[in-house]
Image (spheres, rainbow, N blue to C red):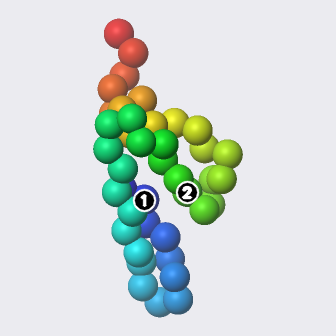
Amino acid sequence: MVLVLKGDTYEEASFKDGERIVSPTFPDFALTAEQVLNSPE
């Protein structure tokens, strides 16, 4: 989940599995939800 402050409230964006995480704060962030949640063995 990524929270983005818009005005005086936060908007939520959820990502799962192989979806690329999109962040307006870090536009070059190129990981998927799966890569973040599953550490390499």
Give the class, few, some or many, for how many residues have Cα within 10 Å of label 2's Cα (few <14, many ≥20). some
Point out residue 24 in the picture as x, y percentages from the top left corner.
Answer: 60, 62
Looking at this rendering, what residue extends furthest in the bottom direction? 8
Point out residue 28 in the picture as x, y percentages from the top left corner.
Answer: 67, 45
Q: Given the image, on which type of amino acid does mark 2 rest?
A: Ser
Give the class, few, some or many, for how many residues have Cα within 10 Å of label 1's Cα (few <14, many ≥20). few
Q: CA distance from mark 2 to mark 1?
A: 7 Å
Residue under the image location 42 percent in, 59 percent down = 2
Looking at this rendering, what residue extends furthest in the front direction? 19
Residue under the image location 35 percent in, 10 percent down = 41
Residue under the image location 65 percent in, 53 percent down = 27
Instruction: Tell me, yes or no, whether the two marked residues, 2 and 1, touch with CB atoms within 8 Å.
Output: yes
- Give left or right: position of 31 versus 37: right
Point out residue 12 in the picture as x, y percentages from the top left corner.
Answer: 37, 68
Q: Identify residue for label 2.
A: 23
Placement of 39 over or under 5, stated as above or below:
above
Helix, strand or loop for disc 2: loop
Give the quarter of the figure containing the N terminus.
Answer: bottom left
Depth check, front residue: 7 or 21: 21
Q: Given the image, on which type of amino acid does mark 1 rest?
A: Val
Q: Identify residue for label 1.
A: 2
Helix, strand or loop for disc 1: strand
